[in-house]
Every structure is written in C-alpha cells, then in structure tokens.
Image: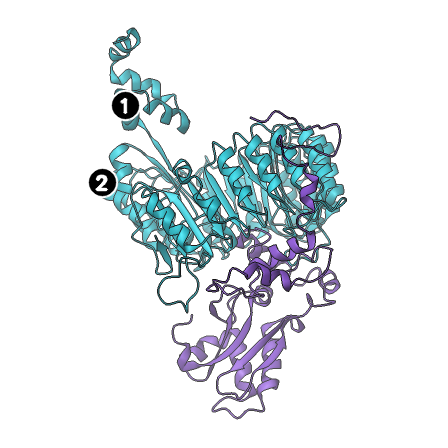
Amino acid sequence: MCLFQCIMNYFPEEVLEHVFDFLTSLRDRNAVSLVCKSWYNVERCSRKKVFIGNCYAVNPELVIARFPRFQSLTLKGKPHFADFNLVPHDWGGYVQPWIEALAKNGISLEELRLKRMVVSDESLELLSKSFPNFKSLTLVSCEGFSTDGLAAIASNCRYLRELDLQENEVDDHKGHWLSCFPDSCTSLVSLNFACLKGEVNAAALERLIARCRNLKSLRLNHAVPLETLQKILVQAPQLNDLGIGSFVSDPYTESYFKLKAVLQKCKSVKSLSGFLDVNPRCLPSIYPICTNLTSLNLSYAPGIQSNDLIKLIIRCKKLERLWILDTIGDKGLEVVAATCKELQELRVFPSDLHGVGNAAVTEEGLVAISAGCPKLNSILYFCQQMTNAALITVAKNCPNFIRFRLCTLNPVIPDAVTNQPLDDGFGAIVQSCKGLKRLSVSGLLTDQVFLYIGMYAEQLEMLSIGFAGDSDKGMLYVLNGCKKLKKLEIRDSPFGNMALLSDVGKYETMRSLWMSSCEVTYGACKTLAEKMPRLNVEIINENEEMEGRPKDKHRVEKMYLYRTLVGARKDAPPFVWTL
Amino acid sequence: MVDCKLDFEETELRLGLPGEKSINANYGKRGYSETVDLKLNLSSKEIGLDKTDLNENNLDKVKNCSNDSVKPPAAKAQVVGWPPVRSFRKNIMAVQKSGSNSEEVEKGTVGSAGASFVKVSVDGAPYLRKVDLKMYKTYHELSDALGKMFSSFTMSKCDSQGILDFMNESKLMDLLNGSDYVPTYEDKDGDWMLVGDVPWEMFVESCKRLRIMKGTEAIGLG
C-alpha cells in the first residue's frame, strides 16, 4: 500500500464528507466517486443534488439506493425535438412513478426540477403532501397539469420558496390557485407564473407579495392588470427579477404616472422580461430600470417595433443576457453591439413564423454583434440568410463560444452571396471556438461540414442537425471525431445504416441519439438493439394502418435510442416499439 | 491526425485530407436545386412519401418531382417543426398577431401563401365544399359562410341558423349535450379537435380540414 493510501485511510469519513461538501459541481462529484470504494461511499451518502438527464436511463429505486440522502432532483423526459412537434403526445416522461418512489422511501425532497415531462395534478398533489420540507419546484416545458395542481402546491407546501413555471402547457381553471397560499406563507423568494393564461385574484396576489419580504423574483402573466402591478411594486421594491405580463396603459392617466413613479424606485431590478401585451408609448417608464439591467427578455413582445427597442437598449449598458425578436433588425443589432459591451448571451427569435420574411435579421447583424461584444459566448440566431464570410468573421471575433446555434428560416439556404454551401463558415466556428459544447447547424450543408466538426469540435457535447449532409460519411465524421458527444439529434438527412452501425459502442458513451426522416431501416435498428442490450432503441410508429411490424428494409421514420441501466421502459405507448 | 490549418486571411477556406481532391470539386457532385428539393421534399407531408414504401427509389421519386427553380423556395414550404421554435412560443406569437400588422399579412396574400383552402364535410351531405379560412376574421364569420354554403341541403333539425348557433362559442356546450351537429377540424398533427377552443388565428394556422359531425358521433371530443 502506498503512502498516500495510508494517509487517506486515516481520514475519518466525516472529514471526507466535509471536504466533499465543497464540491458542488456534478462532474467533480462523479470524478471523486471513482477514486476508491471509500470515497465512492462517502460521496454517494453525502450527495444532495441528483441530476438525471434522461429519466428512462435509470429508475427511482436505483437512484435512491445509490444516493439515500439526496434532497434535490432534476429530471428530463422527452427528447429535445419534442419541442418542435416531432414527438407524439403520450410518448412518455411521467414524473408520477418518481414522486411515488421518493415518497415511499422517505426521501426528504426539497427541490424538484423537471423539463419536458408529463406532470399530472395527482403528481403535484402527492408532491405537496409527501415532503414536509419541500421548498422549490421548477417546471420547464412540461404538460399534463392544471391550476388545480398548483393550488395543491400552494396550499400544502408550508415552506415553499420557489415556484417557477417556464413555458408549460397548463390547463387554466382560472384563478383561485394563488389564493390557496395560506396567510402563514411568507417564505416565497421566487414566483413565476408568466405562462399561465388565466386571471389570478389580484387582491390575493397583492397580499401574498406584501407578506413575502424575501421575494426576489416575480414574473406575472398577462392577465395581471397594470394597477395591480403598480401596487405590487410599491410593496416589493427589493425585487431583482421582474416579469411584466401586460403593459398596456394610456400614458396620460393617473395610474400610469403612479406606475412610472414606482418604477423609478425599483433600483434593484436586474432582470426584466414579459411584455406580452404592450403599448410602446408606455415604455419610457421602464428607462430608469434599464441602467441596471443585466438580463432583458423581450422575445414575447412582437408589439415593440425596432425603433422603440433601440431606444430601450441604448440605455442598457450593463446587459449580459438579451433575448429579442428579429423585429430588432440588423440596425438594431448594431446598436446592441455598440452599447452592450458586457453581453454574453444573445438569442434572436423569429417574429414571423409564416415565412413572409420581411422583418428578419441577416448575417450583418451577427457580424456586428461579434465585433462589438467581446464577451459573447452563447448565441441562438434565427436569420433570413447567412454567408460563409460572415461566419468566418464571427469565428475570428468570438473564439469563446460555448453554445452556437444558427437557424436559417429556410433550412437549406446557401451562402447568400456565393450560393455555396455553408460548410466553411461552420468549419471556421468549430476550429476557432475550442470550448464549443453545443452546436446547431442549418443552411445548405454537405458532408464537408461534418468533417470539420469531427476534426475540430473536441469539446462538443450536443449537436443538432437538420436537412444536411450527403451521405453516411457525414454522420461517421461526427461519431468518430467528437469524443465528448452526449446528445446527437438529426432530422431529414441522408444518413443511414452504415453510419448507424459503424460504431455501436459509441452510443453507450452518449446520452441519446435521435434520427428522424433519415435513411435508417428497421432491420438496422433491430441489429443495433440486439448488439447493444444496454441501449433502448425505440421506434416511433405513426402509421396507423400498419399491421404488425415493418419489413427489415423499410425506412424508419423516427428512431430514438438512449443508454439505460434498466432495460425497456414499461410505460411506452402502443406506437412506441422498443426493439 | 491531419496536419493542416484553416487560413483565415482569405475568405476561401481550403481544407482537405491528404490524397483527397480539393473541396470545391465536391460542390459539383450535387446540384443545389436537387439538394433543396430533396431535403424539403423528404420531410414534407404534402408530398406524402409513403412510410411503408420500401422502394429504394424513394429518393429518385422525390428528385423527379422537383420544382426547377434555382432560387431557394420561400421559407413558407410547410415543413413540420421548422423553424425549430417551441409550440409555446409559437402560440404566443399567433395570439398577438391578431389584428395588428394587417398590412404585413396582406403583403403576403399574393399567391398561395395568402389563401388557406380547407375541405368542409358535413355528415349526411352528398358532397364536400372548400372554404378559404383566410377570408374570415372570426369564428362567427366562418359560421355565417358555412351556413350559407350548406343551407341548400335538407338536414334534420339543421338549417343555416342551426349551424350558425353551434359556431357561436357560448352555445357549443348546448350543442354537445343535445342534438345536431358538432363542428370539428383536423389539425396539423392529424388530431380531430373541437372548433372554438383556440384563438381564431391559431385555428386558421392549424386547421387542415373541417368536418361537421353528427352530435351522436362526437362523444369523446372535448
């Protein structure tokens, strides 16, 4: 036994545990677990936060067995492309079995974060009654619940600090859920119900805000009237993060003046969002807040035209995060570039989803941003057109990208100037941005772009491909080259069996692979499933007329495979076949 | 490992593995227009590629029905899930487009993007009709038009006034509980939905066909 091991063996577990408490990053904790059995045991018993990137990779019993004392659980369900209607309803991702298991095994859950999962009212009620210390619920892109479930959370979670609802499909039974927060509830720190459609009781909301003196983050939905907003802001000048649902007023009324006055006092607001309904002439009342803003999300506000956007942004010199619609135009982006020197993350969403294409941004806006914002590291950019030259310039200006997602409104549009594929442009991005972890490509692309990605994108963890490539070689370049790849999602690209089966072991190093409208056949999927028992290879069959299974040479329309410790899932609907 | 670098000084990159032809030669292998059509048509449900068709010639079939244009087709080609925007966001934008920006909408009404013809079938009627949903701004207007269209048919308990009533959102429940006809539509996902739940604009965007069903058959909807 070496000296080091001798010394380590003398450390009592309490000391190790104390040391491990300083390790908050998941990666560090995972690394530490691999050192030796003793460390594995100490770590697993002291891990407080568990992150499960794919709820079907494991089951609750296994998680509880390994981490008996965890208090925070993050779960993700449906594949990412479910966001774009590519996954049928009822595919899966139910949280109910998790909550049941946690309750049964006496886990003292304090925090639950769910993404793309199906959450029922029954689940929410069980959650609210089973964990007396429950403090924080975050639901992102979930569905299956109504405001009744929220009422249960409000009623029963005595120490609730955080209720954060982001972009969920909620059945709104209108209003009374918020009134269910008892008078004794004073612990709220964060309340976000911007995605709800229905009204809430204004008086109940005002009283709730007034008694929660620690409230830092509040995002209202568009049904909260301006008068209520004004009263709330008077009670809560300490807010850091404000989401204004509806900002419609006649700027010459007394209520508007009152609002303006109170907004001037909101010195601590650093993050602003919402504006689903807005009268642009009321925007000047926001100007005092702009100077301190580090985060601004106007991506739900198509009512604000480019000029008004510019007048707002020109006052936001400290902005680090900006989410905006392409109504801002290239000119507006130039203003952003000139003003927002601290900018780290930019998202430009399309305003015109019917493709008439008048208001969009082009490569010019992107180049301007890259030139003006040296700290930029994350971008999502929906644009009308793009050029290789622009991308090459962007790559030169911004070598620090961690996330780079480009989406051309026409999925196969070539370089707007040269008519060539955009391979070289993306090639420049991956070559320059050595820390790139997430990439989405679009536009006309050949196998060449994948050669670049495979060669240069060494840190890449997630790649999204659509309508790209010429042959299996493209996919092979990526599979062979990107050693850290975790999630690969491909649609409408000519990749087939040869690519799929070339390195079956690779998929166990990844979280998941999605392929839809590609050239993969049923037979190849079966072969893959046979060879790799620790993968679930799921076929989503949407052809109702089909009897029995397809022939081996049939193309498969949608395939989703993922590594798992627990075999085929038992809750798959009839249209999902696990091979 | 390949030993080469991307030369940033020039805008034209040259990158190739030893022994391979220069990249530019690859561009000739596939003409742009074929690529465009191939990719768009592979996914477009309009072309209706038969999923059970095991014919290897799928790709050829698609290439043959290409439109000969060299320019990229307008972004309005109906590709499912493109641009990749969450439904939640799409719905918010759809609701807010109501009324405002009517000028911009009109600019786009020249050509096929402007009309939205859907088949309308009424249970018991001898033939179907087609209506252009974009001609109307509200459910009420549509029900007026349908009423006029189908008033010539003899249907038990259903005159034009009857159809008008059940398009009126507040009377939907009456109708579901009772007699007569229920307006339904098939949405983009292929599901049959009850007319009237969503804002008008969202309905127009997602409605693929209309079916006025007999009340007795509508149990299970809504």
Q: Which residue is mark 2?
A: A105
Q: Position of residue A245 (x, y in %)?
A: 57, 50
Nearest to the observer: residue B16 or residue A518: B16
Residue A49 against residue A567 in the figure, above or below: above
Q: Colour of chain B?
A: purple
Q: Position of residue B83 (x, y in %)?
A: 60, 52
- As measured in the structure, the alpha-carbon distance from the residue carrying label 1 to the one carrying label 2 is 20 Å
Q: Position of residue A513 (x, y in %)?
A: 45, 44
Q: Is residue B24 left or right of residue A24?
A: right
Nearest to the observer: residue A316 or residue A491: A491
Q: Position of residue A511 (x, y in %)?
A: 41, 40
Q: Is residue A175 left or right of residue A223?
A: left
Q: Which residue is mark 1?
A: A42
Q: How is the image coloured?
A: by chain
The chain letter under disc 2 is A
Residue, x 29% and y 28% (percent of image)?
A: A44
Location of residue B130 (image quadrant): bottom right
- Circle 2 Cα neighbour tier, 10 Å, few/some/many (<14 / 14–19 / ≥20): some
Residue, x 53% and y 81% (percent of image)?
A: B121
User: Mark 2 falls on what kind of element?
Assistant: loop
Return the mark for residue A62.
Answer: none
